[in-house]
Amino acid sequence: MTRIVHLNGQWLPETEARISIFDRGFLFADAIYEVTAVIGGKLVDYAAHAARLKRSLHEIGLGLPCAEEQMLALHREIVVRNDLKEGLIYLQISRGAEDRDFIYHDGLAPTFVMFTQARNVLGNPRIERGLKVVTAPDRRWSRRDIKTTQLLYPSLVKTAAHGQGADDVFLVEDGLITEASGANVHIIDRSGTLITRALSQAILPGITRASVLEIARAGGIPVEERGFSVAEAQAAAECFLSSATSFVMPVVEIDGQPISDGAPGPLTRRLRALYLEDRLAAAI
Ligand code: PDD
């Protein structure tokens, strides 16, 4: 099916949407993006994604390209136009196009793109078997709290990991895990405490992470926000990822070392169930 995509206020078949070769998103990765899950045709955690989008844009000196209500209306319309039941909405806003120059100038018209991807999010077979991950040094830039399109490094290391038969990569800096290539990383220790890295400029403030922590606390699961090493994660009772495209995803092996018995853990399963129950009921 040819998707209908959004480009600067227009709805177009995907094959007809065109942007300039001078777009700063293309030349400099001078762009912000968001990924919002769609389940049952509804937006999951939309308000939080919209708030993070605004913050990311602000951090690079941009504003929203349209009013907030219009942004929500566009999200709803793209779901309807593409008859999207389950999958995601990808949104990207770049600073716009001008002749190539490291110095950017005021008054550029931003490039605003949205498209959908149909995906089997809830029934992903990896949920049952869990992910195998490898580790790599975190060589991304130091403002990972801003959701920019500078994804070359995570893309290179994840592709290399796939080549070695792994599903994903844990990035490591100063002896501690920062994130996975496109998800936050959490462990559960032997006493049942959920441990996750505290927010800082070193990691993306994941929307799913925030929801999972809220749901864990409400469900009586103790939460500790602090860094942890690869060795601590390998010795943990359980490990999982969180992101808009995987929700709560078990990790069962790190650098060839199985976590506990090498199967998705019970608290991870419980958190996933609680997350789905809570967030899908609140989807709009
Ligand atoms: N990635 N950390 C990084 C580096 C990410 O790219 C993502 C999301 C997350 C999780 O954030 P959230 O829970 O808000 O999705 C953490 C998206 C899904 C992507 O790039 O496709």
Image: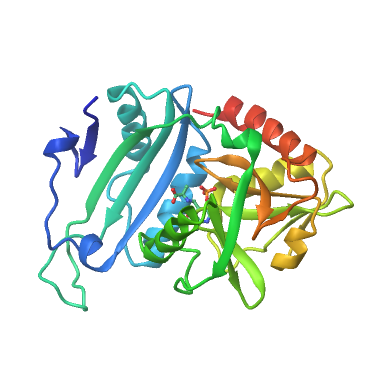
**In this rendering, would 98 be left or right of 211?**
left
**In this rendering, would 234 be left or right of 90?**
right
For image coordinates 19% across by 60% down, the residue present is: 96
- Percent coordinates x, y for residue 211 in the rendering: 63, 43
Check the image and report above or below for 4 versus 200: above
Report the colour scheme. Answer: rainbow
- Percent coordinates x, y for residue 15 in the rendering: 14, 37
**In this rendering, would 238 be left or right of 102?**
right
Quick check: can you spot residue 147?
no
For image coordinates 29% across by 64% down, the residue present is: 29
For image coordinates 25% across by 45% down, the residue present is: 113
Quick check: can you spot residue 262?
yes
Q: Residue furthest right?
A: 191
In this rendering, the count of numbered labels is: 0
- Percent coordinates x, y for residue 65 in the rendering: 27, 50
In the picture, residue 261 is in which quadrant?
top right
Which quarter of the rendering shows the N terminus? Answer: top left
In the picture, residue 35 is in which quadrant?
top left
For image coordinates 44% across by 58% down, the residue present is: 55
78, 65: nearer the viewer: 78
In the picture, residue 102 is in which quadrant?
bottom left
Check the image and report above or below for 162 versus 280: below
- Percent coordinates x, y for residue 122 in the rendering: 55, 29
Check the image and report above or below for 122 versus 263: above
